[in-house]
Image (tube, rainbow, N blue to C red):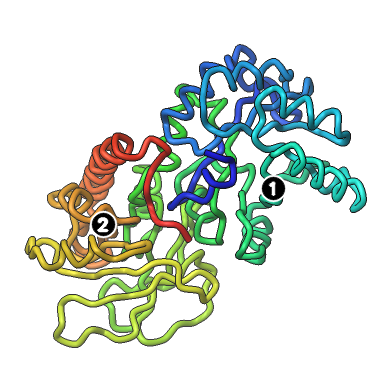
Amino acid sequence: MRFAEALAQPGLQAIAEVKRRSPSAGDLRPDADPAQLASQFANAGAAAVSVLVDERFGGTIDDLRAARAATAVPLLGKGFFSTEGQLRELRDAGADAILLILRDLDDAAMTRLLTYTQELGLDAQVIGINARDLLTFTIDRRKQLELVARAPQDRLIIAESGVHTRAQGAAAELAGADAILVGSALMQAADPPAKLHELLSRPLVKVCGLTRQEDVDVSVEAGADLLGFILAERSPRRAEAVLDVPDTALSVAVFVEDTVETPADLIQFYPDDGGSVRGREATLLRDGRAVARVLDQPWQDHDPVHWSTAAAIEGRVMLAGGLGPENVRAAIAAVQPWAVDASSSLERAPGVKDHDRVRAFIEEARDGRRLDGARQGAETPAGPASERK
């Protein structure tokens, strides 16, 4: 499979990077074996593998050759390249695509090298948007996501650098990225392929109806990816405001019938209060654009119509309503949703979370996610099959 074709598969894809050191962080994994890691990353769901061949990152062209001998997944040759000879050497060593950095090349050089990559049979014109300033090494994820959202929709977009959690990967996905490139987070992990699998695993887990900072903190500590704050006036779980959420997770403001400006990363909007109808739908919005459907149904009743209806929906689906530690595994197994959401079932009073039940819900969702990921891995070796943008 070609590099671009691998990135265009359904769901958020990942390019796992092999690098021994970083100019900004120093040594990451000095003894990294590119052949072993490339094989492990492919088995863990990587759509492609990036190999640093620059000595400033502890890499050489032989690392690319070793990775090519160990795996059939597409390889990205990564470094600082400016000549046709470098590109030809990388192609001959096994690269399917090559990084060209716009900052380092003028328009004429970029045009010349892009033309040559096509002559070599390499994939070109995939756009990578880096969260890291290559001069200062600082990370600006917000600016990166703004650029991702503005990128041409007819191009494959890679969000590069700064992804350490599922929520950060999901933020890139919802902004419009087809893939994330992850290096340092994998190289610093005790088990790099397990870390990659974690970043790609679905469903995401949302704890909603939060009104107290201590409940937010417990949810984050337990591993929640999304934190929900109900801002509808008549809700018994109404929060006064969106509380502090670390950048390792995403905040969600929940509104009924109308919205107002908030600092939340996402908006969950119900067009009406549902009246006497228990099941209803909402839309998850990012900057006013719909990015997922929320199915708020009485899942605890095990109504087969709910399960089959939800499972048949294409695109990203978040299940909400009646989910808790007791049934979230069954929901994941039946529907394979993009996210699961619990609120009142995790409370000891309206708006006050029971911390043990919060932890139990997140743990049960993780266990269901592992089982679902194992099934998907057996069916689709290229990686998880969550829905594309």
- Residue topped by disc 1: 130
Taking the image as drawn, is residue 75 in sight?
yes
Callout 2, which amino acid?
A: Lys
Foreground of the two, 58 or 312: 312
Please report contact status of discs 1 and 2: CB closer than 8 Å, yes or no.
Answer: no
Q: Nearer the viewer, mark 1 or mark 2?
A: 1
Foreground of the two, 345 or 7: 7
Q: Say few, some or many: other residues with alpha carbon within 10 Å of mark 1 (under 14 / 14 to 19 / 20 or more).
A: many
Query: What residue is at 38 percent from the left and 74 percent from the top?
Result: 283
Badge 2 element: strand
Taking the image as drawn, is residue 231 in sight?
no
- Quadrant for residue 211, please give it: bottom left
Query: Which of pointers 1 and 2 lies earlier in the amino acid sequence?
Result: 1
Foreground of the two, 147 or 44: 44
* Residue 129 placement (x, y as % from top left): 68, 51
* Residue 148 placement (x, y as % from top left): 63, 59
Query: What residue is at 52 percent from the left and 76 percent from the top?
Result: 288
Badge 1 element: strand
Callout 1, which amino acid?
A: Asn
